[in-house]
Structures are given as structure tokens and as C-alpha cells.
Image (spheres, helix red, strand yellow):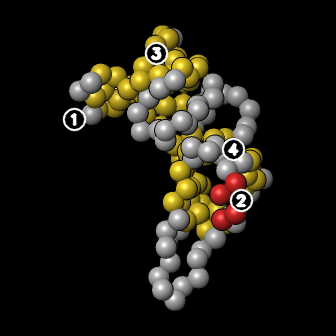
Amino acid sequence: MAQERNGAATVVAQEGNQVRIEHRGKHLTIPMKGFPPGFRLRPGGRVILVDEPSGLVARPLVRAIRSRVKREVLQARGAVEIEGRRLEMQQSTILDEAQPKSEERPSEEYFLWVVERGAGEPPDQVIAARRRR
């Protein structure tokens, strides 16, 4: 069973599916797990360290933002302005379009999962967006 290890670490660089991190004054390079294929973390982003049977891995450390957003804006997967905050999407950002019940109109309210960051300037990175049901 996977187990969290000593909390979060700060991303120094990403090299393919490996991430170089700083944690408690040490630099480590470990595999990334649980990220969408092709997702690129920026320096300053944060990950959670997890001990798995295969060894130590970096998993996404995210927080959710709930906001009204036009579907077309999210589908473009570019920069998004939400409540005065600039967010950045990538082609690999997961977009889940929950289907409304038969007589309901699709909601423009979404949950956006944003990668936590320790330092650095915005924009925050959106790893996934899901339409509110």
C-alpha cells in the first residue's frame, strides 16, 4: 500500500517522466506518477512524495477551484482568467465533460484542479477541469 512520505517537495526541473525535486535541503530525481501523459511541471510547482512498492514517486499536489467558465475557453487549453487569477492549461490538461441529465442545460460551472506552487510567479498550472454535475 502506498504511503505519503514527509509531505510536499518543490520541483526544480522535469526530465521526461522524472522530476528533480528539493525536499528538506536534499535534491532527488524520482519518477512522476498520476500526471496526465505529456504534462509538464514548471519549476516552483509542488508534488507530494509517496512511498510505493516500486519506490519513492512524485504525485500531483493540487487544490480545486470552482468557477464559471465557458466550455470553449477550456477546450482551447490556453491561458484562462479566473476571478482575477491567471491559469495556464496544456494540451495534456484533462477536460472531463460530465453529461447533464436529459432535460438539464449543461452547466458552465467547473472544478479546476491547480498544481500547488511554492515559489515563482503565476500563472498557476491546471492539471484537470471537470464540469460540475
The residue labelled by disc 2 is: 73
What amino acid is found at the position of numbered circle 4 in the picture?
Answer: Glu
* x then y, percent, for residue 128: 54, 50
* x then y, percent, for residue 16: 52, 23
- Mark 1 or mark 2, which is nearer the start of the sequence? 1
Residue 29, numbered circle? 3
- Mark 4 or mark 1, which is nearer the start of the sequence? 1
Give the Cα distance between marks 2 and 4.
11 Å
Name the residue at the bottom extreme: 103
Residue 34 in view, yes or no? yes
State whether residue 67 is above or below residue 28: below
State whether residue 119 is above or below residue 78: above
Give the Cα distance between marks 2 and 1.
39 Å
- Give 70 or 120, whichever is nearer the viewer: 70
Give the Cα distance between marks 3 and 4.
25 Å
What amino acid is found at the position of numbered circle 1 in the picture?
Answer: Met
- Mark 4 or mark 2, which is nearer the start of the sequence? 2
Say which residue appears at 57% left-offset and 40% top-offset. Answer: 115
Give the Cα distance between marks 3 and 2.
35 Å
What amino acid is found at the position of numbered circle 2 in the picture?
Answer: Val
Q: Residues within 10 Å of mark 1 (few under 14, many from 20)?
A: few
The residue labelled by disc 1 is: 1
Q: Secondary structure at mark 3?
A: strand
The residue labelled by disc 4 is: 88
